[in-house]
Amino acid sequence: DAKTTQPPSMDCAEGRAANLPCNHSTISGNEYVYWYRQIHSQGPQYIIHGLKNNETNEMASLIITEDRKSSTLILPHATLRDTAVYYCIVSRSGNTGKLIFGQGTTLQVKP
Amino acid sequence: AAGVIQSPRHLIKEKRETATLKCYPIPRHDTVYWYQQGPGQDPQFLISFYEKMQSDKGSIPDRFSAQQFSDYHSELNMSSLELGDSALYFCASSANSGQGVYEQYFGPGTRLTVT
């Protein structure tokens, strides 16, 4: 599975959009981009995933560049409860589904 | 909506003892994963089961074993416990979509402390 690179930490003002970048320059054609987050010591929470097209759900939007070498997770209106570690994970379709967690980005939402 | 259930939530054991952690997946989910998260670390994949068969294995010590039962619940058995086994243990479940795309739903974790 491709390696991902994320900034170690980011701040965001409450109510503003949080844009979390992820680089996955070695991604291959059958690899999906997944985003999970972990609020302190809780179980990780699935946010969204995508292959090529941009995706949106009730939690967030995922923007994947045309060359698929990077992506951005967008939380449109961040709240204090969005403070968490956000993990960008690339995983090949058809594998067993295991998640390889990397460093992640610690997002701090401030009032 | 039903979530993944893990028991116990907290467990304290002494070195060289054994521990059994249980996981009850979301109904109709056929795949279970186990992860270990040490203090200040990211979760690490241990092992997974699909339809009661082991499907993948990560950095799981030989002292650990796991299985998935006919009702799809899973148990992680840990023997000869060491201080370094102190960690949060998460179980996750997913439904095999047949397309190789998995959304995993995690339980609240079991905090194991080895003294």
Image (tube, rainbow, N blue to C red):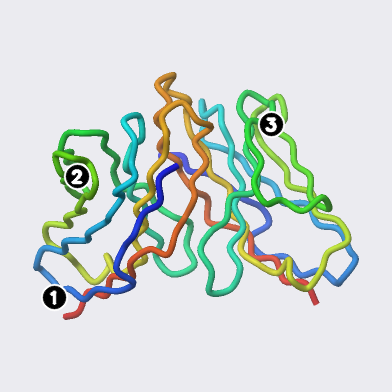
Which-is-in-front pick, marks 1 and 2?
A: 1
Q: How many marks?
A: 3
| x then y, percent, for residue B90 | 58, 53
Furthest residue in direction front, as rendered: A26
Work out whether mark 1 precedes mark 2 in sequence or the reverse, and give the earlier one.
Answer: 1
Callout 2: 10 Å neighbours few (<14), some, many (20+)? few
Kindly identify which chain the residue marked by label 2 belongs to: A
Where residue B47 sits, quadrant-wise, is top right
| x then y, percent, for residue A17 | 11, 63
Identify residue type, mark 1.
Ala
| Rendered image: mark on residue A58 | 2
Identify residue type, mark 3.
Gln
| Callouts 1 and 2 close, C-beta under 8 Å | no
| x then y, percent, for residue A104 | 38, 63
Kindly identify which chain the residue marked by label 3 belongs to: B
Q: Residue at x 87, y 71 (%)?
A: B15
Taking the image as shown, residue A84 lies to the left or right of residue B33, namely left
Against B30, residue B57 (above or below) is: below
| Rendered image: mark on residue A13 | 1
Taking the image as shown, residue A21 lies to the left or right of residue B86, namely left
Residue labelled with disc 3: B54
